[in-house]
Amino acid sequence: MSMPVAHPHQPVPSQAMPAIECRGLVKTYGEGSAMVHAVGGVNAAFGVGEFTAIMGPSGSGKSTLMHLLAGLDVPTQGEVRIEGTVIGGLRDRDLTRLRRDRLGFVFQSFNLVPTLSARENIELPMRLAGRQPDAGELELLASRLGIAERLEHYPHELSGGQQQRVAVARAMITRPAVVFADEPTGALDLKTGRALLESLRMAAHDRRQTVIMVTHDPAAAAYADRVLILVDGRLAHELRGPSYEQIVAMMAQVGS
C-alpha cells in the first residue's frame, strides 16, 4: 500500500482504566539452550478509543503478543487484564464468553463459513450470543466497507478483498470493546485498504472501541494514534501521532 493521505490524529483522553493492559508479559518456547523468548517482559496499556499499531522486524513477536493480549495463548509469565479482569484466572467457559462478547477479531485467514451468505457470516457472532442482529448497524458497516451489494453472495462468490471486508464487518457488528486486526490490509487493493483503515479509525474515535492492529506496512500504521515497535520480543519504541515518514525511518533503524 502506498503512502496514505495525511490525517489529524485525535488525542486520546486519559482513562481511569485501560481497555487492555499487560504487565511483565513473557512467552517462551522450548527449554535450555533451545529456549526462545517470543515475548520478553512487555508492559503496555491500550486506552479506550485508542488505535494502536504493533510493528517490528520479522520474528519480533508481534503476532504472539496479540494472541496473548486476546487470550488466544497463555503467557509463561505476567498477566493480561481486559477491562480490569485478569484473564489468566478465568475458567475456559468464562474466557470464551469474554472473547465472544467483548472482543472482535480480524485475522489473515478470513474464517468465513462457506455455506453462509456474507450477511449471515456477519450476523453469526450475534446469533451465537443469542442476540438479534441490528439490521441498521449491519447495513451501515456494509456500506462503509463497500460490500452493501454483496451481502447475499457466498464466500466463494467474493474476491479475497471482499471476504476480508466481510470478516471486518463480522468483527465489528457486536460493537466489541476491543478489535484485534492481524495484517488486515494484506489482501486488499489501495482504495479498499484505505477504506478499511478508515473504518478501524472510525471504530476507535467515533465508537470508542479500542483497536490493536499488527502490521508490517508503514502506510497502514500511519492511520493509528500510536505505533509500538517490538524488537526481539521487547517493546523498543513508541511513536505517538506518527507520520508515514517517521514510521519508515524507525523501521529502517530497527532493521525491518
Image: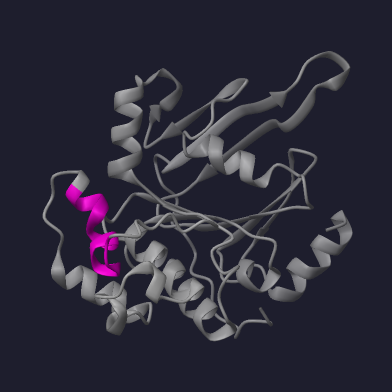
Kindly give the residue lying farthest to the left in the view shown: 132
Of residues 190 and 127, the one nearer the viewer is: 127
Q: Is residue 60 left or right of residue 92?
A: right
Looking at the image, what colour scheme do you see? one colour
| Residue found at x 59% / y 60% | 183
Up the image or down, 48 lies above or below 119; here it is above
Of residues 26 and 131, the one nearer the viewer is: 131
**Secondary structure predominantly adopted by residues drawn in magenta:** helix
Count of marks overlaid on the render = 0
| Residue found at x 53% / y 86% | 191
Give the image quarter of residue 217: bottom right
| Residue found at x 53% / y 42% | 45
Q: Position of residue 50 (x, y in %)?
A: 47, 57
Q: Can residue 86 be found in the magenta stretch?
A: no
| Residue found at x 14% / y 69% | 135
Give the image quarter of residue 134: bottom left
Q: Position of residue 116 (x, y in %)?
A: 27, 61
User: Does residue 208 appear in this view?
Assistant: no
Q: Is residue 91 left or right of residue 6?
A: left
Q: Position of residue 52 (x, y in %)?
A: 55, 56
Give the image quarter of residue 2: bottom right
The stretch of residues the image draws in magenta is 116-127
Up the image or down, 239 lies above or below 41; here it is below
The quadrant of the picture occupied by the N terminus is bottom right
Q: Is residue 118 left or right of residue 215?
A: left
The quadrant of the picture occupied by the C terminus is bottom right
User: Does residue 177 appear in this view?
Assistant: yes
Q: Position of residue 93 (x, y in %)?
A: 30, 25
Kindly give the residue lying farthest to the top in the view shown: 32
Of residues 74 and 52, the one nearer the viewer is: 74
